[in-house]
Image (cartoon, rainbow, N blue to C red):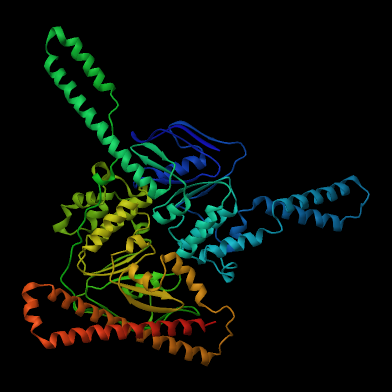
Amino acid sequence: MLTLQNIGVQFGGEVLFDDLNFLVNKGDRIGLVGKNGAGKSTLLKIIFSQSGFTSGSVSLHKEKIIGYLSQDIDFESGCTVLEESEKAFPRIKFIQKELLFIQDQIVSRTDYESDSYLDLINKSTEFEHELNLIGGYTYHSNIEKVLFGLGFKSEDFQNNTETFSGGWRMRIELAKVLLGNPDLLLLDEPTNHLDIESIVWLENFLKSYSGAVLLVSHDRAFLDQVTNRTIEIANAKVYDYKAPYTRYLFLRAERIEQQLSVQKNQEKEIKRTEDLIDKFRYKASKASFAQSLIKKLDKMDRIEVDNNSVKKMNFSFPMSKPSGKVVLEIQALSKAYDDKEIISNLDMEIARGDQLAFVGQNGQGKTTLLKCIIGHTDFSGTIKEGYNVDLSYFAQNQAELLDSTKTVLSVIEDVADDALRHRSRDMLGSFLFSGEDVDKKVSVLSGGERSRLALCKMLLQSSNLLVLDEPTNHLDISSKEVLKAALRAYKGTLIIVSHDRDFLAGLTNKVVEFRDGFIKTHIGDINDYLGLRKIESMRELEKRTKVIVNPVAEPLGKSERKALDKDIKKVSNQLSKVEGQISDLEATIESNDKDLSDPIKSSSLLADETFFKNYQSSKDSLERHMENWGALEEQLEKLLAKRP
């Protein structure tokens, strides 16, 4: 279907690609991977435009069509979501327009016996036949299916695209690309602005897609679900693996090991040759021999090992003075956009050292609550900051706010204080910007590079409260791992919005669930939370949100709805209280167990009757609280099911 042969790309003398070769066949589901800045997005652009390369050729099989989702989109204003989606069917729209004209002519003309009138009849028949063949009478149902799958509601269809955020506009563009049903889909970070439910829908769509798919993604689970082949860009070359991402990692490790072995042998040969050159260079009888050895070295193809572990982010977060015990106290907080209430009468306390993960579907209020906390939007109720709180915030669009005219180095120097400015280059090195990279303009950076630069810029400032909204968007997988390690070492309070289970695992000690208009805090990390829900993944969680609602529930009156919401809030508060008591009891029992395992302490404890009495009492109390928690959880589920 597609052939790339001997592709070479240079920018200002720097080699991005050198002699790239690979084929794309029907049915291929290819994940294009490589570290940030390796050229993944550039390669997709080259394939789509079949231009932009210095050498080589891109050959697309005759009459094959390419669909391309770029990270950069440009919408015309004045179109509704439905009208914009219909642009995926230009032939259908053309035929419909022609048929309207022809039918108007047929009705208005009276020369029924003329050849031109008969031509109109024949043309109308031909167009109607073609319209039927290409789905002209069913394409609106396809549009609805794709838009619903990507998270839109029926009432969104008639809204203008400019009323939507950049993330939702990207969904519209993705819908257009999918609806076009091309032979080859090129997708650049398609999941960046999708919630889990939409990601699952897209996975199923792509797995059953009849054409070929070539995609760039930093979502490991998505790559494993969708792809059957992985192409890695490394050292300006490509390495092709007939395997999805996780399997590719094992195969890549084997390749790196082989490369290191070959490189070691080559280095020995180079050292031996250089010693011979030094030995015979100045001897007249051996000068020609020395010259031949020099030419041999010049022609040698040096082995390069692409080992990402050699160069990773290594950053420790600067800390300010410790905050007070209570970091944030939220009381009766409510927030609505027009007539739509997003958050209702929320009470929450965030203590020093809390590490919170906000999870749930898009549109449930996660980012809205963050904006309330940092003061970027108005609300009713109160948010009281505790003593000595020093907050840093990373927004989803933080990378887009960078000044594109500045260099990487100047962006950092502009925000660094006097004590840190002289270390700007070292800090940029921690975020994978080294050598000439620091002199690049922001305008030429890839999406991933911009995100790393934005993170570095924010983290230059000391803080004891970090608020991060989807910080891993555009970060490659290895960079996500290093960022996670740095966050785990952070000593302050952390609030993070993410739908990436691998990233959240082991990172937080509380999970705040946004579901069906209610906000509830669970003790433990994301794995504890999913275990509590008796589900294996956040993907299942998103799918279960629809099952909870009773599809045949009768509409409630205003007073009934108010009473039900009051009951739900009451049970939710009881659950939160019980979970806190369970956490305290578990901590007490764990401390007692630790003391009993200590040979010195245990001897005195054995003689203390009150200790064992209290110890057993804690265990009995924990069992009762667990039973109570189960009953409350079941009660809450039943109440939620009554909401129509």
Quarter of the picture containing the C terminus is bottom right
Q: Is residue 427 above or below residue 392?
A: above
Q: Residue at x 34, y 42 (%)?
A: 252
Quadrant of the image occupied by residue 269: top left
Q: Residue at x 59, y 85 (%)?
A: 554
- Between residues 113 and 242, which one lies in front from this camera angle? 242
Image position of 218 (left or right of 58): left
* Residue at the limit of the structure toward the top, as seen here: 285
Can you see residue 317?
Answer: yes
Quarter of the picture containing the N terminus is top right
Image position of 500 (left or right of 459): right
Q: Residue 598 at x, y = what percent? A: 10, 72
Quadrant of the image occupied by residue 473: bottom left
Q: Residue 353 at x, y = what percent? A: 22, 73
Q: Is residue 105 above or below residue 81?
A: above
Q: Residue 105 at x, y = what percent? A: 83, 55
Can you see residue 381?
Answer: no
* Residue at the limit of the structure toward the right, as seen here: 113
Q: Residue 550 at x, y = what percent? A: 55, 79
